[in-house]
Image (cartoon, rainbow, N blue to C red):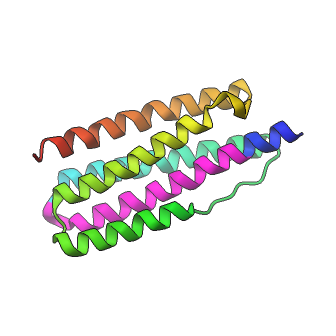
Amino acid sequence: METTEKSIEVLNDLIEINNDRVAGFTHAAKELGDQDPQLSTIFIDFKNQSRENVHQLGTTINKNGGEIEMGMSGSGAIHRMWLDVKTAFSGHDRKSILEECERGEDAIKKAYERALDTQNALPPHFIEIILNQQQGIIAAHNRIKALRDSED
């Protein structure tokens, strides 16, 4: 039972950071407003990706008898506060927003790497779900990074 509880805890941690990501991309799209509809659309796509991740993780937790924790991480609150401060001083600059989004993407990439650590001893079906989601997270990170790099 302890292994199942630990596995569910790992999935709940991923739910929290995906919820942070939803809030972060919602905020970033709002900060851009009508200035950059193409980038806002990308942010909305990534927000929806995390919503789907949360749904999939939550379904897996339910199927395994666990309780879903739908909150956000403490570091996520700090991340959003930092974005608020930075955009207030930068005048909602596209490059600054992309830099902060890349920081957020770095954090979620690390969370997925930690989740897959062999010490977590996750069951194979949990690992499969996390690996599939991780591929999308990495692709999103790379896209944000490429957009940020194009601003130089």
Q: Look at the magenta stretch and give its main secondary structure.
A: helix
- Residue positioned 26% across, 41% down in the render: 145
Q: Residue at x 51, y 35 (%)?
A: 133
User: Image point 51% across, 51% down: which residue?
Assistant: 18
User: Position of 16 compared to 90: left or right?
Assistant: right
Question: Is 61 situated above or below 93?
Answer: above
Name, please, the residue furthest toward the left. Answer: 152
Q: Is 129 above or below relative to 38? A: above
Q: Based on the displayed image, in which of its 4 quarters is residue 127 positioned?
A: top right
Residue 20 placed where, x, y %? 49, 58
Using the image as rendered, state which of residue 63 and residue 76 is in the foreground: 76
Q: Where is 89 relative to 97, above or below? A: below
Q: Measuring from the top left, give residue 33's x and y in whole percent.
A: 21, 67
In the image, taking residue 94 as reference, residue 58 lies left or right, namely: right
> Which one is nearer the viewer's eye here, 106 or 42?
106
**Nearer to me, 4 or 46:** 4
31 magenta-colored: yes
From the image, which quarter does the N terminus lie in?
A: top right
The furthest residue to the front: 119
Please give left or right for residue 81 compared with residue 93 in the image: right
Task: Tell me the magenta residue range.
Answer: 9-35
Q: Quadrant of the rendered structure where residue 94 is?
A: bottom left
The x and y percentages for residue 85 are 30, 73
Q: Image check: 66 left or right of 99?
A: right
Q: Quarter of the image holding residue 122? A: top right
Q: How many marks?
A: 0
